[in-house]
Image: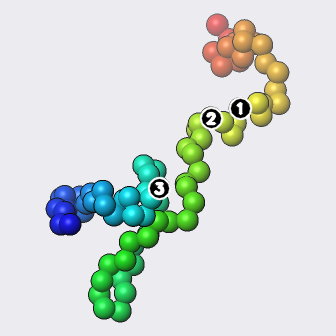
């Protein structure tokens, strides 16, 4: 089961290994080198948390109740 490394250092994990480790897209993979110098590949524990919307943490947090025309007047200044 040979594979070729890309210029970015990426390799494709052969299907036989993915199947044996029950890997799915998005799964983490741990690499280690044992005393004999062999690389050991294991499925990492748990899936990474799904990526949250970058505005999700701010949504609904505003305390100031501005009306649009008041805010625009404040931002634009006096005419």
Residue 17, numbered label: none
Residue tagged 3: 27
Instruction: Please say if the residues under marks 2 and 1 sit with CB atoms less than 8 Å apart.
Output: yes
Mark 1 closeness class: few <14, some 14–19, many ≥20 residues within 10 Å: few
Mark 2 closeness class: few <14, some 14–19, many ≥20 residues within 10 Å: few
Q: Earlier in the sequence, mark 3 or mark 1?
A: 3
Q: Tell me how far mark 3 sits from mark 1, CA to CA.
A: 29 Å
Q: Point out the image quarter for the N terminus.
A: bottom left
- For image coordinates 69% across by 40% down, the residue present is 57
Instruction: Please say if the residues under marks 3 and 1 sit with CB atoms less than 8 Å apart.
Output: no
In the rendered view, tell whether residue 34 sits above or below residue 46. Answer: below
Residue tagged 1: 59
The reply to whether residue 23 is visible in this rendering is yes
Q: Regarding mark 3 in the picture, which secondary structure is present there?
A: loop
Residue tagged 2: 55
- Left or right, 49 with respect to 19, comes to right
Which is in the foreground here, disc 2 or disc 3?
3
In the rendered view, tell whether residue 54 sits above or below residue 69. Answer: below
- Find residue 2 and report its horizontal and vertical position in percent: 18, 66
Residue extending furthest toward the bottom: 35
Instruction: Please say if the residues under marks 2 and 3 sit with CB atoms less than 8 Å apart.
Output: no
Q: Residue 75's quadrant in the figure?
A: top right
Q: Tell me how far mark 2 sits from mark 3, CA to CA.
A: 25 Å
- For image coordinates 37% across by 87% down, the residue present is 34
Q: Earlier in the sequence, mark 2 or mark 3?
A: 3
- Number of marks present in the image shown: 3
């Amino acid at each position: 089961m040979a594979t070729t490394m890309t210029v970015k250092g990426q390799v494709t994990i052969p299907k036989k290994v993915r199947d044996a480790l029950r890997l799915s897209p998005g799964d983490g993979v741990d690499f280690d080198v044992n005393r004999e110098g062999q690389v050991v590949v294991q499925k990492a524990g748990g899936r990474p948390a799904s990526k949250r919307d970058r505005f999700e943490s701010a949504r609904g947090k505003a305390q100031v109740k501005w009306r649009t025309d008041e805010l625009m007047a404040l931002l634009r200044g006096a005419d």
